[in-house]
Amino acid sequence: AQSVTQPDIHITVSEGASLELRCNYSYGATPYLFWYVQSPGQGLQLLLKYFSGDTLVQGIKGFEAEFKRSQSSFNLRKPSVHWSDAAEYFCAVVYNTNAGKSTFGDGTTLTVKP
Amino acid sequence: EAGVAQSPRYKIIEKRQSVAFWCNPISGHATLYWYQQILGQGPKLLIQFQNNGVVDDSQLPKDRFSAERLKGVDSTLKIQPAKLEDSAVYLCASSRGGAKTNEQFFGPGTRLTVL
């Protein structure tokens, strides 16, 4: 069965520091990969997505992610974190072999220190 | 454009009671999803509709959960009877068409507490 692993449950970074959130997916057919952000009491908002082509994708709010097939990873990065980035981040995968069912990781909570 | 609407935002019930959640997707979105998000976990897909037909309900506990999307627009998710382990946030999402690459737009969710 397809699965998504986010190894870091909680990450704390200082404002202005760089950020990398890890995401690994189980090997399978062509994956479609997504990163979502969820602020307290809010629904999920799409940050970026990867389907094919350039393995480095740019998203909203200054985020980017790199798809590495050899490592089955799709890590999210941001060069300089802002206090407003504090939230929970979810990685999700959809495989081409099913009807578009999304599988989400369990999330990484980001805390930003002033 | 208006986002995905859900109601109620919060609900507290006792076990063995029944509860229903309502979702109004973004206008024109053919695909509608219901997710269950237990505290500390990612969203888990319960059911996916394409227009008013069910595409995937493999993870829906059909002995107690039911969902419908009459006329291919609004949807309701019902739990009857509720158990303690049903305490979670229930998220509704919608997307254009049925392509796997379509972005899902999420509502704010309904937080259910079962006592």
Image: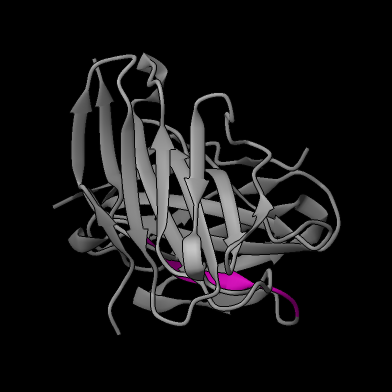
Relative placement, left or right, of B82 versus A29 is left
Relative placement, left or right, of A83 versus B94 is left
Q: Position of residue B70 (x, y in %)?
A: 48, 61
Q: Which of B108 and B66 is in front in this view?
A: B66
Going 61% across and 77% down the picture, which residue do you hit?
Answer: B97
Q: Nearer the viewer, residue B22 or A109?
A: B22
Q: In this view, does A75 lie above or below B17?
A: below
Q: Position of residue B109 (x, y in %)?
A: 30, 50
Q: Nearer the viewer, residue A44 or B60?
A: B60
Specify start and end residues of the magenta stretch as a single range.
Answer: A44-52
Relative placement, left or right, of B90 versus B46 is left
Going 58% across and 69% down the picture, which residue do you hit?
Answer: B51
Q: Can residue A79 be found in the magenta stretch?
A: no
Q: In this view, does B81 lie above or below B23?
A: above
Q: Position of residue B19 (x, y in %)?
A: 31, 33
Q: Position of residue B18 (x, y in %)?
A: 33, 27
Going 49% across and 58% down the picture, which residue do you hit?
Answer: B69
Total labels drawn: 0
Residue B61 visible in the displayed image: yes
Snapshot quadrant of residue B73: bottom left
Residue A12 visible in the displayed image: no
| Rendered-image quadrant of the C terminus of chain B | top left
